[in-house]
Image: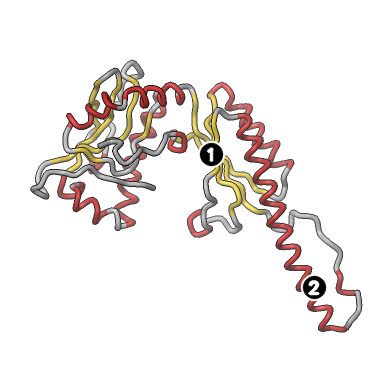
C-alpha cells in the first residue's frame, strides 16, 4: 500500500492537517453525516469544480510529516488508521461512486484539497463516471489438495526396496508439481471467465498463508468491477466455476470500495 503525506507546517505538533478519504460527485447523494474519520474527528465535505472531497481533521502531533513517517512503521498504528480510513470510504461507496484516496493522504489545509479538485477535475470526474453503478468484488482461489487425478502406484515395478522408495518419492514430487500446474491453469481459466463478466478486472499477487489465514496456498486473488444489474449473474458464474474446477476452493468477497480500479496517483498527484 503506497503512502505519502504532503509536507506540513514547519512548527511540528501544532494545529491540524486535512486527511483526504475520497472524492464523490457534487451532484451525487449527500455526504453521510455522523461518520467518524481519522483520529476520531467527524468527516467534512469540501466542494469545488462540481466535485466533493470528503475529509477529516488530522492533528499534526500524530499526522504531521515527521510523526506520520514514524507512525507508518508501526503496524498496529497503521492498521488502526487503515480501518478508520476504510470505514469512511466504505460508507461513501454505499451511497454512490467514490474515488478512494490512498492511505495517509494528508494536506496542509482546505485550500490545498479544493485545489486538487480543480486541477484534477477531468481525471476524477472521468473515474467517477466509470465507477458509477458498479461494485468491486473479489474472488480468491485456494488449492484443494488431492483434487487432481491420481496416478498409478509404481511401487511394484521391482528393483528392491531402495528403488521402490525412490520411485515413490519421484511420484510424490511429480504429483505435487502436477497439482501446482493444474491449480495454476484452473486459476487462469477462472479469472478469464470472471473478467469476461465484469466491466474491468485485476489479478493481484496471491497472499501469503500467514496473511490469508488459509490452510492451503492461494493461487487466485482477483478483483472484478461488476455492474450492479449483473451481480446475480456474477454470483452464479462463481458457483459454476467452483463446480467446474474442484481443484480450487473459490471464495467470493465484497462488495468493496473500488480500490483496485482507481489509477495510482503520480508523484505530483494529491499534492
- Report helix, strand or loop for mark 1: strand
Residue 157's place in the image compared with 118, above or below, is below
Q: Real-space Cα distance between discs 2 and 1?
A: 40 Å
Find residue 228 and report its horizontal and vertical position in percent. Answer: 53, 24
Q: Residue at x 32, y 46 (%)?
A: 3
Which of the marked residues, 2 or 1, is nearer the chain's N terminus?
Answer: 2
Q: Is residue 90 left or right of residue 153?
A: left
- The percent position of residue 216, horizontal first and vertical second, equals 61, 57
Q: Nearer the viewer, residue 192 or 247?
A: 192
Q: Is residue 171 left or right of residue 76?
A: right
Residue at left offset 17%, top offset 40%: 17
Few, some or many residues within 10 Å of mark 1 (<14, 14–19, 20+): some
Residue with the most extreme top position: 27
Quadrant location of the C terminus in the rendered image: top left
Residue density around tag 2, few if under 14, some if 14–19, many if 20 or more, within 10 Å:
some
Relative to 190, 62 lies left or right: left
Q: How many marks?
A: 2
Residue situated in front as seen by the camera: 173 or 133 = 173
User: Residue 181 sits in which quadrant?
Assistant: bottom right
- Seen at 61% across and 30% down, the residue is 234
Residue drawn at point x = 35 percent, y = 44 percent:
83
The quadrant where residue 87 appears:
top left
3 versus 50 height, above or below:
below
**55 relative to 211 in the view: left or right:** left
Q: Secondary structure at mark 2?
A: helix
Residue 249 vertical position relative to residue 224 in the rendered view, above or below: below
Q: Mark number for residue 202? A: 1
- Residue at which label 2 appears: 168
Q: Quadrant of residue 180?
A: bottom right
Where residue 244 is drawn, which disc sits there?
A: none
The percent position of residue 84, horizontal first and vertical second, equals 31, 42
Amino acid at each position: 500500500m503506497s503512502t505519502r503525506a504532503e509536507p506540513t507546517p514547519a512548527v511540528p505538533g501544532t494545529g491540524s492537517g486535512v486527511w483526504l478519504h475520497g472524492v464523490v460527485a457534487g451532484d451525487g447523494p449527500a455526504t453521510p453525516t455522523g461518520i467518524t474519520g481519522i483520529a476520531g474527528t467527524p468527516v467534512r465535505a469540501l466542494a469545488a469544480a462540481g466535485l466533493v472531497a470528503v475529509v477529516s481533521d488530522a492533528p499534526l502531533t500524530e499526522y504531521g510529516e515527521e510523526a506520520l513517517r514514524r507512525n507508518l512503521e508501526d503496524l498496529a498504528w497503521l492498521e488502526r488508521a487503515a480501518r478508520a480510513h476504510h470505514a469512511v470510504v466504505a460508507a461513501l461507496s454505499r451511497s454512490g461512486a467514490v474515488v478512494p484516496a490512498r492511505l495517509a493522504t494528508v494536506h496542509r489545509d482546505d485550500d490545498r484539497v479544493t485545489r486538487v479538485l480543480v486541477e484534477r477535475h477531468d481525471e476524477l470526474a472521468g473515474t467517477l463516471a466509470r465507477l458509477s453503478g458498479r461494485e468491486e468484488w473479489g474472488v480468491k482461489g485456494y488449492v484443494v489438495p488431492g483434487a487432481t487425478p491420481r496416478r498409478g502406484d509404481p511401487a511394484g515395478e521391482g528393483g528392491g526396496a531402495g528403488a521402490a522408495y525412490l520411485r515413490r518419492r519421484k511420484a510424490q514430487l511429480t504429483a505435487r508439481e502436477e497439482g501446482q500446474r493444474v491449480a495454476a491453469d484452473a486459476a487462469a481459466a477462472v479469472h478469464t471467465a470472471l473478467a469476461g463478466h465484469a466491466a474491468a478486472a485485476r489479478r493481484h499477487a496471491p497472499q501469503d498463508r500467514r496473511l490469508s489465514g488459509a490452510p492451503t496456498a492461494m493461487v487466485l486473488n482477483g478483483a472484478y468491477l461488476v455492474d450492479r444489474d449483473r451481480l446475480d449473474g456474477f454470483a452464479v458464474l462463481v458457483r459454476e466455476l467452483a463446480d467446474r474446477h474442484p481443484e480450487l476452493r473459490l471464495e467470493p468477497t465484497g462488495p468493496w470500495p473500488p480500490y483496485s480500479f482507481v489509477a495510482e496517483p503520480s508523484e505530483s498527484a494529491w499534492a
